[in-house]
Image (cartoon, rainbow, N blue to C red):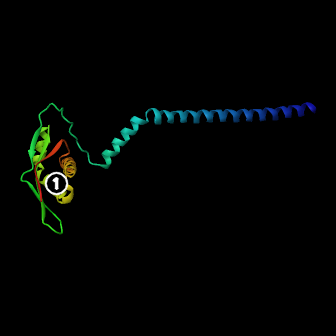
Amino acid sequence: MAKKEDLDLDVEGKGKKSSKSKLIVILLVGILVLGGGGGAAWYFLVMKGDASAQDVDADMEDVEQPVVRKKKRRKSNEPPLFTGLDPAFVVSFKDQSHARFMQLSVELMSRDPEVIEAVDQYKPMLRNNLLLLFSSQKYEDVITREGKEKLLEQSLEEVNRTLADEAGMDGVEAVYFTAFVAQ
């Protein structure tokens, strides 16, 4: 009978050892799977994440905003092309003591003939948006050189924004005031 008990103990011992072995194997496999998944995640996020993130950002921009075909800037050795937004702009200022007004002539410059054609096509919209911009100015701001330069920058942004919205391109490189009177 002692032998039978020894056998039972051995069977129970083997069972405990095999269950411990199974547990260890399961833990090792789990660690390898988690480690492999973590390594793969690290690889795709860190090593390829920059390109993937840029692709996702570009895709999201296409979804959220209308597609705008931007013209590439031409080399500076190509001659500039000019077009005027005639007639001259005339706007008045609100001032309590004096009637004040501003008159400006505006020329746009690009090196791309297609942009000049788009400016001519959308000239009424461009004039409207610039007229709104000019009429929102304060007399005290536009009589200084810094104020005029700031107005030039705002005008360039407005022109390119309007062309991008309407024609699907921008490319006006500069706005010039060829006549400027503020009284």
Looking at the picture, how far across and down is residue 103, in whole percent? 10, 56
Question: Nearest the camera: 111 or 33?
Answer: 111
Dot 1 amino acid type:
Leu
Question: Nearest the camera: 151 or 70?
Answer: 151
37 sits left or right of 119 in the view: right
Which residue: 14% across, 54% down?
A: 125
Looking at the picture, how far across and down is residue 160, in whole percent? 20, 47
Dot 1 lies on which element? helix
Q: Is residue 51 above or below residue 64?
A: above
Q: Is residue 57 above or below residue 124?
A: above
**Quadrant containing the N terminus in the rendered view:** top right
Q: Which residue is mark 1?
A: 130
Question: Nearest the camera: 103 or 114?
Answer: 103
Which residue: 43% across, 36% down?
A: 49
Q: Residue furthest right?
A: 1
Q: Is residue 124 above or below residue 62?
A: below
Which residue: 10% across, 43% down?
A: 117
Res. 175 in view: yes
